[in-house]
Image (cartoon, rainbow, N blue to C red):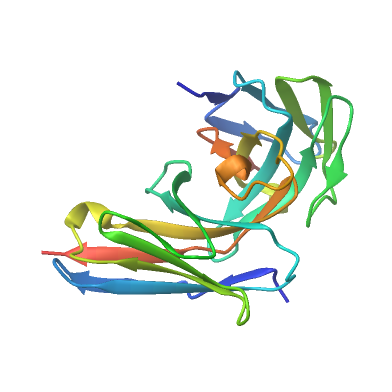
Amino acid sequence: RKEVEQDPGPFNVPEGATVAFNCTYSNSASQSFFWYRQDCRKEPKLLMSVYSSGNEDGRFTAQLNRASQYISLLIRDSKLSDSATYLCGKGNNNDMRFGAGTRLTVKP
Amino acid sequence: DVKVTQSSRYLVKRTGEKVFLECVQDMDHENMFWYRQDPGLGLRLIYFSYDVKMKEKGDIPEGYSVSREKKERFSLILESASTNQTSMYLCASSSIRLAGITSSYNEQFFGPGTRLTVL
């Protein structure tokens, strides 16, 4: 079983919609969690870290549920520019494992 | 501005050739990583290094080796390239995690990637 599992999508949503992605993980010793965004033919870039208490950055909200071993990303009021692949990352000390990514397309 | 650079954006090699992929970071990061990214499989960790001359196997080290002679440089080596090693290769770096701090200290910064084709 992979350490990090994601629904690959694709998620096709209209502008203005709210969309949520989940990512499940194994290895409960994991210490840090992240969401990365990857545009087509580009490298992944950090979108936000995920804290136990949940955190929000504008239209983006990340949650961590250690008991059920998943993290989530909620995007409100989707914009065309949110179209990308979203990768969840799980850090263990100094290394990182990623999910396969969830493809989001926001349509006008 | 943080920067991770990779020696080539596109590379075409023949089966059996020895291939070197170079990665350099200018952030004085201790950790460096090599991933390959394939459709449907996502990012898979090949090797990582947490210090000069140190290396650790990731999830798919077979067919690869690495070298870290200097802190800023991490090389991925394909001793004898095969067609199943055709992929996008991404290098990343991060600073060390500080004990007791839960923050983005493990944030990884990625290079632009090398698209390797093995014929």
Q: Is residue B117 above or below residue B5?
A: below
Q: Quadrant of the C terminus of chain B?
A: top right
**x and y, in percent, of residue A57 in the image:** 33, 53
Q: Residue at x 25, y 59 (%)?
A: A59
Question: Quick one: which residue is furthest to the bottom in this view?
Answer: A68
Q: Please state which of residues B11 and A35 is positioned toward the viewer in this rendering.
A: A35
Give above or below for A26 relative to B36: below
Front residue (pair B40, A44):
A44
- Splitting the image into 4 quarters, where does residue B4 fall? top right
At x 56% / y 45%, what residue is drawn? B104
Q: Is residue B114 visible?
A: no
Q: In this view of the protein, which residue sits in the foreground, B103 or B106?
A: B103
Compared with B94, B84 (above or below) is below
Give whichever of A95, B57 is nearer the camera: A95
Please tell me which residue is depicted at 77% across the width and 41% down the height of the picture. B48
Determine the residue located farthest toward the left in the rendered image. A108
Instruction: Measuring from the top left, give residue B79's x and y in whole percent.
Output: 85, 36
Q: Position of residue B106 (x, y in %)?
A: 63, 43
- Residue A101: in sight, yes or no? yes
The answer to whether B87 appears left or right of A102 in the picture is right
Which picture quadrant has residue B70? top right
Residue drawn 14% across the image and 67% down it: A16
